[in-house]
Amino acid sequence: MSEHPFIRLFNRYLREQGLPVTHQRNRVAAAVFGSEDHLSVDDIEGILRAQDERIGKATIYRTLDLLVKSRLVEEHDFGEGFKRYEHRLSRTPVHQHLICSECGDVEEFESPEMPAIEARVAREFGFRPSRHRLEIYGLCRSCQEAGVTLSQEGLACPIEVA
């Protein structure tokens, strides 16, 4: 397992930080790197249990913190009350997200226009971007077909886009 290139990168980061390389850390990292999904801590714990690994949530949280600090994994907060994690070494390292407000489904998409939009906005504002994140919230096709509608209750901002 430690021969996997992503695990080797993580282990190099740990050694550079003076931290021990452990079996538990490598197993958590392997669970994240082995998935193309946006994993919660519970998802990771489930993957590990299915592999007969008994690694506590505290160790999973600490390892995820290290993976995020290493910049190999990105942390997402999609408003579900918990965070999700995805590795940045996927087939599509630069992508955007569609998040269903009803079922929580997250769909990734790539937009070839995004680099040009980012460059134009950066030029206009004299800004030097280091990264970007685009998240669009709404209802997925399945929830719409099931008759779910978005509630318009609550405060409305006069500049909100419909």
Image (spheres, rainbow, N blue to C red):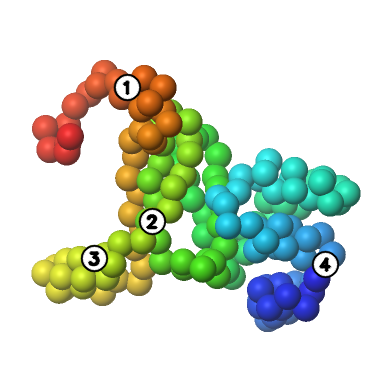
- Point 36% across, 27% down: residue: 144
Residue at disc 1, secondary structure? loop
Q: In which quarter of the image is residue 26?
A: bottom right
Give how far across and how far down residue 61 sits, in percent.
68, 51
Disc sitting over residue 113 in the figure: 3
Q: Can residue 40 be seen in this view?
A: yes
**Label 3 is placed on what type of residue?**
Glu
Residue at disc 3, secondary structure? loop
Measured along the vertical axis of the image, is residue 149 above or below residue 54? above
What separation in Å lies between label 4 and label 2 (alpha carbons)? 35 Å
Disc sitting over residue 89 in the figure: none
What separation in Å lies between label 2 and label 1 (alpha carbons)? 23 Å
What separation in Å lies between label 4 and label 3 (alpha carbons)? 42 Å
What separation in Å lies between label 4 and label 1 (alpha carbons)? 47 Å
Q: Can residue 71 be seen in this view?
A: no
Q: Is residue 88 left or right of residue 56?
A: left
What separation in Å lies between label 2 and label 3 (alpha carbons)? 12 Å
* Residues tagged 4 and 3 counted as in contact (Cβ below 8 A): no
**Label 2 is placed on what type of residue?**
Phe
Of labels 3 and 1, earlier in sequence is 3
Residue under label 2:
109
Of labels 4 and 3, earlier in sequence is 4
- Point 67% across, 61% down: residue: 34
Give how far across and how far down residue 135 sits, in percent.
35, 49
